[in-house]
Amino acid sequence: AAALAAAAAGARTVVIERAEHPRYKTCGGGLIGTSLAAAGRHVQVPVRDTIHTITAALNGRREFTRHDDAPLLAMVSREEFDDALRKAAAGAGVTLRQHATVRGISEDGGLACARLADGTSIRARVLVGADGSSGVSSRYAGVRFQQVDLGLELEIPVPAAVAAQWQERVMLDWGPMPGSYGWVFPKGDLLTVGVIAARGQGDQTRRYLSDLVSRLGLAGYPAARDSGHLTHCRADDSPLRRGRVLVAGDAAGLLEPWTREGISFALRSGTLAGAAAAEAAAAQDPVRLGQALGAYPAAVAQALVPEMDAGRRLLTAFTRHPAAFHAGLASPKGWHAFARFCRSELPFAALVERRPVRMALTLMSRI
C-alpha cells in the first residue's frame, strides 16, 4: 500500500521483501468494509467467501446466530491477497527485491540507508518500515507497545459437506480468559480457526484453541498449518517516525485493540506513509522536507488513533464484562451496530460517542 501510494505520487520506489510472494502469513484474513475499499482501489480483491451470517457464543454457551442480506465481511487468503497487491505495485512501476532481508537502518548525508543481509545497501531519501512489530524499522524508530497478545491459528481442510455448513458464516466465541476470543473463518474448503489472548497465558491459550476445535467437531480433520504470532498495539505516545524513517502497519503498532483487526490499519497507514514519503522525497528544502515527514504522524493521529482509542475502551469493558457484551450484541440495536461496524458504516470512534454506549462503557469500566 505504501509503495502504491508513493509510486502514484511520482516517487521512484523500491520494495525490499524478505520472503517471496506468494507466501503464507498467519492471519484470519477477514476484511471489513474499509479494507475492501482501500484494497479495491488497486486490485480486484481475491475473495474466498462473502459473509452474511455471524454466530456468536460465550465460551461455547448462549449461542445465537444473526443474518444480514447485505455483506458483512469478505474472507481472503493472505497469500493471494498480498500477492495481488505485489502485482499491482509492480504494475505501477515499483521495483521489487524479494529474498532481501534488511539487517539494519541508518541515516547519513540526507539519506536513509537499509543494510541488507548480503552486505549491500539501499539508500533513499525516505524509508517506510512495513516489516512488522519485530522488524528492524520498529526498533530503529523506537516504537513502544502498550498491548501484546498471542494469536494461535489452524488452517483446516474440511470435506465439502462441512465446508457447506460454514459457507457465508463466521463464528466468534468470547473466550475463557479476560479479553480473549476465538473465531472460525471459512475460505472454501478451508477453515481458519484461531484464538487470541493476552501474552503470558500460552498454555491456557493453546488449551482454548484445542477446546474450541473439539467443541465444533473439527478435531478429526488434520490441520494443514498450525501457527502463531504476537500482535502489538502501540502506546499512545509511541513515535511514528525517526528522521527520514516512517513506520506503518504492525511496525508502528497500529491495530484495533479489541478485535485486533490490523489489515485496515496497515492499508490506511501504508497509504498515508507512502504519500508522505513521496512528498518528502520531492521536497527542495529542509523546511518542506520536515513538513512532509511531519504530516504523516498528524494524519495517523487524525484518521486512525481515534479508532484505536475507541477500541481500547471497548476492550476494557469487554475484558471485565464479556457476558454483558455478548448480551448487547444479541440485542437488535447491538447487532445492527456490529453489522454496520463490519461494513465500516459505523466506526468504533463514532459508536462509543453515542450517549447510551458512552454511559454503558463508563459504568462497565468502573465495576
Image (tube, rainbow, N blue to C red):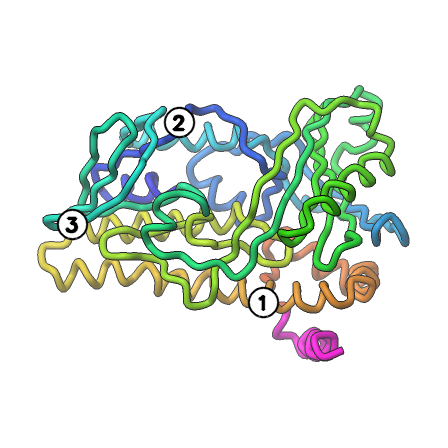
The dot on residue 365 is none
Q: Is residue 14 above or below residue 61?
A: above
Q: Give the image quarter of residue 217.
A: top right
The span from disc 3 to disc 2 (Cα, nearest Å) is 25 Å
Residue extent of the magenta highlight: 352-367
Is-magenta flag for residue 359?
yes
Q: Which residue is mark 2?
A: 87
Q: Is residue 99 above or below residue 318?
A: above
Q: Which residue is mark 1?
A: 310
Q: Position of residue 317 (x, y in %)?
A: 70, 68
Q: Which of labels 3 and 1 is toward the front?
A: 1
Q: Main secondary structure of the magenta part?
A: helix
Q: Say which amino acid is labelled 1.
A: Ala
Q: Secondary structure at mark 2?
A: helix
Of callouts 3 and 2, the N-terminal one: 2
Q: Which residue is mark 3?
A: 282
Q: Position of residue 321 (x, y in %)?
A: 78, 67
Of callouts 3 and 1, the N-terminal one: 3
Q: Nearer the viewer, residue 314 or 352?
A: 314
Which residue corresponds to the image point at 73% horizontal and 50% vertical from the top-left? Answer: 181
Say few, some or many: other residues with alpha carbon within 10 Å of mark 3 (under 14 / 14 to 19 / 20 or more).
Answer: some
Q: Secondary structure at mark 1?
A: helix
Image quarter hosting the C terminus: bottom right
Q: Which of labels 2 and 1 is toward the front?
A: 1
The span from disc 2 to disc 1 (Cα, nearest Å) is 35 Å
Left or right position of 136 against 345: left
Left or right position of 329 against 286: right
Q: Nearer the viewer, residue 120 or 254?
A: 120
Q: Nearer the viewer, residue 1 or 109?
A: 109
Left or right position of 31 against 203: left
